[in-house]
Image: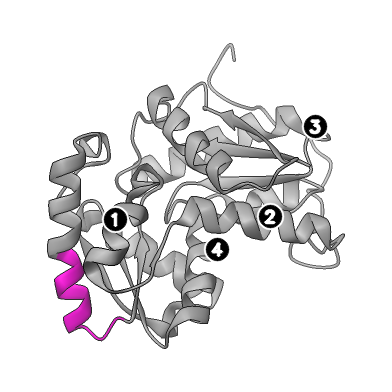
Amino acid sequence: MHLLVTNCNTTASMTEEIVAGARAAASPGTTVTGLTPAWGPESAEGWLDSYLSAAAVLDTLRRYEGQCDAVVMAGFGEHGREGARELLGVPVVDITEAAAHLACLLGRRYAVITTLDRARGQIEDSLHTAGVFTNCSAVLGTGLGVLELGDDERTLDAFVAAAERAKESGAEVLVLGCAGMTGLQRAVGDKLGLPVVDGVAAAVKLAESLVSLGLTTSKAGGYAAPLPKRRLWGPPGA
């Protein structure tokens, strides 16, 4: 089985971290290829970045049609998953949706802990669109930017502080609200006394399950293949 895991930004070092987390979660025999968009924002933090990221990710994925068994979109709360499901003939699993679905199997209420507060609206909208927002007790920011997550000690401290607020909101499960937090659940799960769901790992396992079951995106309605027409992709000269 071959999975494509696409970063939502142009920071290659973050792609490497995401791919490492995906490979750690993948089953034996599953190969993982990481994709970094050739253009777009270096980190996705806000509506403008998110829409630019979505276009760049779709531009990247279209070049790999027919070259994988499933796609994992590793941008938490970012746009583009519906377009990717139209574009591709294989299962497309978004880490936001995957993490929330698994969290709902582990407790009655879950909370998302993300980076900056400005990302909360996008994440809430994404969860609502996916039909899993009802079980969300809170979406909380740590105050850290995406590119600051490389500082492991600072990230852990900020996550734990936000987790305390999440527990006060009634959360029984925590969700890592950024692909750059991949791997953090191993460091904080026991300390917090709550299950912690990593979106990248969740998406990988769900993607594998869909492929193993022979299931893919329905083309009967909303995710039907795009209408044939001329489309100009990417920035000029791309």
Question: Within 10 Å of the Cα at label 3, are there few (<14), some (14-19), or many (20+) other Cα atoms?
Answer: few
Circle 1 or circle 3, nearest the eye:
3
Q: Residue 119: which numbered mark, if any?
A: 1
> Residue 59, position in %: x, y?
62, 31
For the residues labelled 3 and 2, the Cα–Cα distance comes to 15 Å
175 vs 54, left or right, is: left
Q: Name the quadrant containing residue 137.
A: bottom left
Q: Secondary structure at mark 2?
A: helix
Residue type beneath disc 3: Gln
Measured in 3D between alpha carbons, the distance from the residue under mark 4 to the one under mark 1, in whole angstroms, is 18 Å
Q: Earlier in the sequence, mark 1 or mark 3?
A: 3
Q: Please tell me in which quadrant of the rendered image residue 118 appears.
A: bottom left
Residue assigned mark 4: 98
Labels 4 and 2: the sequence-earlier one = 4
Q: Is residue 166 above or below residue 114?
A: below
Residues packed near mark 1 inside 10 Å, few (<14), some (14 to 19) or many (20 plus): many
The region drawn magenta spans 162-171
